[in-house]
């Protein structure tokens, strides 16, 4: 029988998971929401970050430290990927989005196959003091790995929100998809701003990938599990809203855990698509969309 205690536990776990969902979606919120890049390869980069964290962890690195260390590498990777996308697709016409989808599908395929060939198809785990232990909170026991992921995700989301709202480059990133001509008049190069922003979106994915492998084991095709969730959160939040991404992640996390508690695990994956369809029907611009 469902009880208030069960509901309380579901909400608490949903908040922890929801903040993690926001962290794994925030890079897509920048790439897709602010830059209008059809970055369907975002979850694949997320898994790539998890495997990079796994390799460093095997050499004695803490997973969080490993994720931070990978951020500069992923930043450069993201800048290179966007430059190729711009020169090959975006620069050539208005149908860049359609052709870009094929490009990013190819990137997904390359990452999946590359990881499978290098690491095999078995699941991979990392080791740390906070993995496998729990935190007592009254009569509840919270997995410490979720608490750590929640804390890092919250700091990451707040930090990126402040960067985009308080710095000239951040404000330029928010403006580049709205009015490139006005941005040029302010002395900023839209292409360089987009390249920088895509690098940031990819860099935060490295740390989010570290959180992913902390929360649970990963395997090369896990990106397929998160593609629906991440796009749901970005659309639910309103394209390009960082604070909205956090709120949308919390909504999805709490909704999933309540459905999981009431109806079982088989129904939980349908929550993201259900929320996405409802939001598109009621408020297409999202909760915080302009």
Image (cartoon, helix red, strand yellow):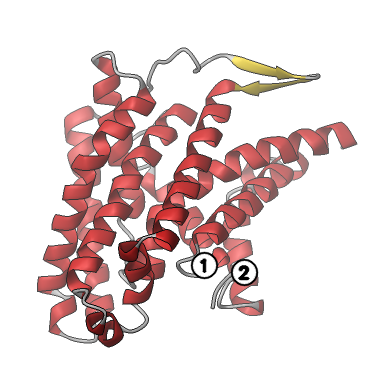
Question: Residue 108 placed where, x, y %?
Answer: 26, 53
Position of residue 171 measured from the top left corner of the image (x, y, whole percent): 37, 68
Q: Quadrant of the N terminus?
A: top right
Q: Residue at x 50, y 48 (%)?
A: 158
What's the mark number on residue 287? 2
* Whole-percent x, y for residue 229 in the image: 50, 54
Read off the residue under disc 1: 235
Drawn side of residue 245 relative to residue 58, left or right:
right
Distance (Cα) linking label 1 and label 2: 9 Å
When asked about the image quadrant of residue 236, the answer is bottom right
User: From the viewer's perspective, is 71 left or right of 10?
Assistant: left
Determine which quarter of the picture holds residue 97. bottom left
Q: Nearer the viewer, residue 222 or 59?
A: 59
Q: Earlier in the sequence, mark 1 or mark 2?
A: 1
Query: Residue sitting at 56 percent across and 53 percent down?
Result: 246
Callout 1 secondary element: helix
The reply to whether dot 1 and dot 2 touch (C-beta < 8 Å) is no
Numbered disc 2: secondary structure: loop
């Amino acid at each position: 029988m469902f009880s208030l205690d069960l509901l309380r536990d579901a909400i608490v776990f949903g908040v922890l998971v929801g903040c993690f969902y926001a962290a794994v979606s925030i890079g897509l919120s920048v790439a897709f929401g602010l830059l209008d890049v059809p970055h369907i390869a975002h979850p694949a980069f997320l898994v790539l970050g998890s495997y990079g964290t796994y390799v460093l962890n095997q050499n004695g690195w803490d997973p969080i430290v490993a994720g931070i260390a990978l951020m500069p590498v992923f930043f450069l990777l993201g800048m290179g990927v966007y430059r190729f996308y711009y020169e090959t697709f975006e620069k050539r016409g208005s149908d860049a989005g359609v052709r870009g989808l094929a490009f990013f599908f190819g990137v997904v395929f390359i990452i999946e196959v590359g990881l499978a060939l290098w690491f095999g198809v078995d699941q991979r785990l990392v080791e740390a003091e906070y993995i496998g232990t729990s935190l007592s909170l009254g009569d509840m026991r919270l997995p410490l790995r979720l608490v750590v992921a929640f804390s890092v995700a919250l700091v990451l989301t707040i930090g990126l929100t402040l960067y985009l709202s308080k710095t000239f480059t951040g404000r330029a990133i928010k403006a580049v998809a709205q009015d490139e001509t006005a941005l040029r008049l302010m002395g900023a190069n839209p292409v360089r701003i987009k390249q920088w922003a895509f690098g940031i979106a990819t860099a935060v994915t490295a740390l989010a990938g570290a959180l992913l492998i902390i929360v649970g084991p990963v395997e090369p095709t896990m990106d397929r599990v998160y593609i629906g969730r991440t796009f749901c959160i970005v659309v639910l939040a309103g394209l390009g809203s960082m604070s909205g991404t956090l709120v949308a992640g919390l909504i999805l996390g709490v909704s999933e855990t309540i459905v999981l508690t009431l109806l079982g695990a088989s129904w939980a994956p349908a929550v993201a698509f259900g929320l996405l369809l409802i939001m598109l029907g009621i408020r297409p611009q999202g909760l915080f969309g302009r």
